[in-house]
Image (cartoon, coloured by chain):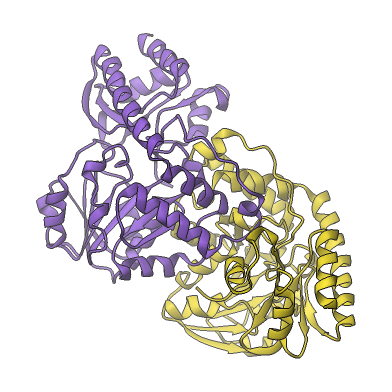
Chain colours: A yellow, B purple
Amino acid sequence: MLDHGGDLDLAQQRFAGRLEDWIDLSTGINRQPYPLPQLEPRRWGALPSRADIAQLHEAARLAYGTRAPIMALAGAQAAIQLLPRLSAPGQARILVPSYNEYAGVLRAAGWDVAEVSTLEDLAGADLAIVVNPNNPDGRRHDPADLLALASKVGRLVVDESFADAAPELSLACEAGRPGLLILRSFGKFYGLAGVRLGFGLGSDADIAALAAQAGPWPVSGPAIAIGRCALRDRDWAAATAERLGSESLRLDDLARAQGWSLVGGTALFRLYDCGDAMAAQAQLAAAQIWSRVFAGNAGWLRLGLPGDETEWTRLAAALAC
Amino acid sequence: MLDHGGDLDLAQQRFAGRLEDWIDLSTGINRQPYPLPQLEPRRWGALPSRADIAQLHEAARLAYGTRAPIMALAGAQAAIQLLPRLSAPGQARILVPSYNEYAGVLRAAGWDVAEVSTLEDLAGADLAIVVNPNNPDGRRHDPADLLALASKVGRLVVDESFADAAPELSLACEAGRPGLLILRSFGKFYGLAGVRLGFGLGSDADIAALAAQAGPWPVSGPAIAIGRCALRDRDWAAATAERLGSESLRLDDLARAQGWSLVGGTALFRLYDCGDAMAAQAQLAAAQIWSRVFAGNAGWLRLGLPGDETEWTRLAAALAC
């Protein structure tokens, strides 16, 4: 398994403390989750029905502002696992630095994978991958530029796992065009990553192919019920986007006082250059706060947002040590 | 999507009634589910950790009586979806009649699929599929015969989705041998099909290949917590196996009084020849009881077991109409 952040038990093994005492800021998962709705017994007991799944899809279309063909999967990660099978292996290009699963999954399935650093370098690929806004550096791409790119590649995958709080970046409304596939994550913005829910939005052919590969019932009954309820709640989404936006600036203030410089970020995480990231990670871990470092860049530390005032206070105290 | 039973909303559309008034006997899912344990917030909010998954695997090994390499997936179906990728496409043979997903999934992935009617006819296949005990006819195979067969095929997959109440049939204790892959379902016996949980047990190489194809986090946090708790509860499993065993005989008595003959079954479902299965299905559906018919056999009706005395009474009344 690649390094992803979020594996708090490894932090606990290295730095001690009880698991429940740790604050996990190593991911970009919202720590003020959507309140769980009451779940009917049939959500646990019965296989999800076609009607259940159709209702979830409608809620997701509402949230993402699209009428495109859509398919619920067990997280955006589940869509990534199926990507290599949407066409015969060829050349894939990934705009990096970015989420590290793409390269591994594609190479394992026989794709030739090139990592490139500009959008222009993606042109000509059989399969091009862009995360927008990007993880871990928050880099943003104009949807018009991505649409223009789509016509120059075999298939363009836009991973919008962190786009809930930046809807102006989303190409979901353009999904349905041949050769454009949008991936969405449910668990990050809604703070419910354990539920395992995400979506693919794309052409009829691509969505049918994803559905055939995933098989019946790829998503649990509770995930369907929770996802439907949360995705229809546009008031919660708007309030949460606003809260995360202002709290990410609060985190930047703390980091600046530390002498760290902002590399970039989204409303769900921030990436700082703090000179010696391993030392900064160890300093926070001594106070049972977990963060993410990157093998490729010794200065980079990624932090998610604390969930409440108690967590903000602990973070400020840990940084003041 | 193939016909599977369990799609109660289709029954409701055809025969009316409110969804919550229907008794779904069209599947082999236990209608007295394992009581849900309290779920900590982190099960919903956080990504499952390696330690969480390892504990689930240990519980499953305990339940299935094995020390073999194991991999949790989102239902036995999720393992079926990955089967075609464990080796290059060749000739697959499936002992039929059986679960209809195997042939479709393998053919879609380029396998040459033959359906055969005796165990002996499986010998020589690159990939052989046996469901034990079988769905829908309850046919049982001696584990020794299956072990002997394993040495005569490239890979033998034994689907033990209905073996929880018949542990004497299980080859889980032999899993780990190269070329033998066992699939287990959690949701049927534990009555929690909506949770989406199942397991593959096999050689190190096969389990590593399944894990690579499935990617990180294929199973939800709640599924991990519930599965771990339920699979460790061997008292509940023993009591449930006994209850299901005696209640399946009770169902046979009802059917016999109807003039139906038992084709076979497991502790979770029974298959009857009732002459005109469509008429029998319609008779039960008029009382909002859903059952399963089979395109290939006009006489066959499959019934799961009612969950409580109210349901038994409604079934008896519907049959008496």
Quadrant into which the C terminus of chain B falls = top left
> Percent position (x, y) of residue B185?
38, 47
> Percent position (x, y) of residue A235?
83, 49
Q: How many numbered tags mark residues here? A: 0
Q: In this view, does A280 lie to the left or right of A123?
A: right
Which image quarter: residue A238?
A: bottom right
Judge whether A110 appears above or below A33 on screen: below
> Percent position (x, y) of residue B298?
26, 29
Which image quarter: residue B232?
A: top left
Q: In this view, does A34 lie to the left or right of B15?
A: right
> Percent position (x, y) of residue B20?
56, 26
Judge whether B151 appears above or below A144 on screen: above
* Residue ID at (76%, 67%): A268
Depth check, front residue: A57 or B167: B167
> Can see residue B228?
yes
Q: In this view, does B309 lie to the left or right of B247?
A: right
> Can see residue B97?
no
Judge whether B19 appears above or below A177 on screen: above
* Residue ID at (46%, 53%): B74
